Amino acid sequence: MSIKDFSTRLPTALAAAVSLCAMVAAAPAGAADKLTYFTWSGYELPDFHKSFTAAHPDSVEISTFGDDDDAFTKVKAGFHPDLAHPCYDKIARWNKEGLLEPIDTAKIKNWEKIFPVFRNLPDIQAGDGKVWMVPWDWGNTSILYRTDLVSNPEKSWNLLWDPQYAGRMATIDAVHDTPVVAALVAGVNPFDMSPAELDKVAEKLREQRPLLSSYTTDMTSVEQALTSGELVAAMTWNASAVALKKQGVPVEFMKPKEGMLTWACGFVMLKGTTHQDLAYDFINSRLEADSGKALIESYGYGASTSSAFAAAPPADLKALELPDDPDTVLKSTVFTGPMKQNDELSKMFEKVKAGG
């Protein structure tokens, strides 16, 4: 190649090099433009945020957790999503650690359609029209049992302490589930316990431990074990009852005399997020009537908005035993709120599970 040929081709080569550098530089920026969302396994379904996907194709990365105590631990340790999906009883804990960014309700299009019982929860209030959590879903925790393998049980959480079913029962590995139920069975207020009452709950948990096949948050495995008959009863959420009844498995979701547990969860924005606009678009998409309807029909959970219930066929709501006003449910259930002794209860539960 002559010097002339080289000098002629140099601008073209430089232009190509500059273009390549620009593409390389743009790649991380493109990835950084994605919203990151941290949620329960099963809540990542695209049917829950269709309008967000339509407006922002390929703009959300979703990570899942099995329990919001694990989620809290990961976020506290440095994992930093833009949005997360804990439950109400944990909000004060997240807030105490300085993890949350207030959410402006003026930017939440369907805020007024959220049922007042959830919209006005004390621990989500951040003042000046802002909240720490936007409620999205609610549901129940109870005993799902095989009606052909457990005959005429007492409608009580005590079923999970029945020695005749030893090794064929499972319960949820979460401090706001199994220890709360142990407290109810022991006649103790789960949300504010004295040291003596904590000891009483610990003793009840120790009594139960050898009767259980497992503590778990893997509802798929629990559902499979109930289907096969390996398990005859398990603490589950109502989504498991919906799934197994659709498959024709003879199960019943109990209404214990001590009360089902009712929980509510929602979206929190993590402090320091650089994707606030995407975060608000995502939350707004999830609060649309069709999104809430998909949640109701997919899992039998309640949506937080009245518009979602209005969109769901009344026959479906009747089959799912979901009243269109959560206040109706809360009159006969135990609402899972903040636990004053959460840390002590958590340590005690871990000790009991380890055989202590």
Image (cartoon, rainbow, N blue to C red):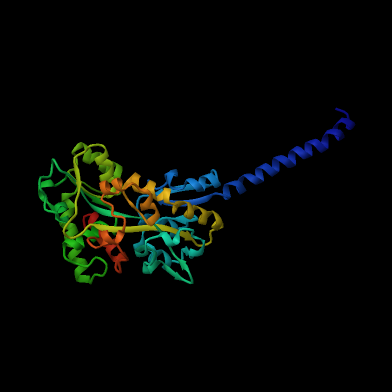
Asked if residue 47 is positioned above or below residue 81 in the image, the reply reads above
Taking the spot 74% from the left edge, 42% from the top edge, the residue there is 18
The x and y percentages for residue 202 are: 20, 62
Taking depth in this image into account, of 78 and 276 the one nearest to the observer is 276
Report the front residue among 280 and 336: 280
The correct choice, above or below, for 341 with respect to 58 in the image is below
Q: Quadrant of the C terminus?
A: bottom left
Q: Is residue 25 left or right of residue 174?
A: right
* In this rendering, position of residue 34 left or right of residue 224: right
The spot of residue 23 in percent (x, y) is 67, 42
Q: Can residue 320 be seen from the camera position used here?
A: yes
Q: Would residue 104 be visible to someone looking at this image?
A: no
Instruction: Tell me which residue sits at (55%, 56%) in the image.
Output: 277
The N terminus: image quadrant: top right
State which quadrant residue 249 falls in: top left
Q: Where is residue 321 shown, x and y percent of the image?
A: 25, 50
Count of numbered circles in the view: 0
Q: From the viewer's side, name the closer residue of 270 and 303.
A: 303
The residue that appears at 29% across and 46% down in the rendered structure is: 315
**Residue with the most extreme top position:** 1
Residue 94 pos. (x, y %): 41, 63
Q: Residue at x 48, y 69 (%)?
A: 129
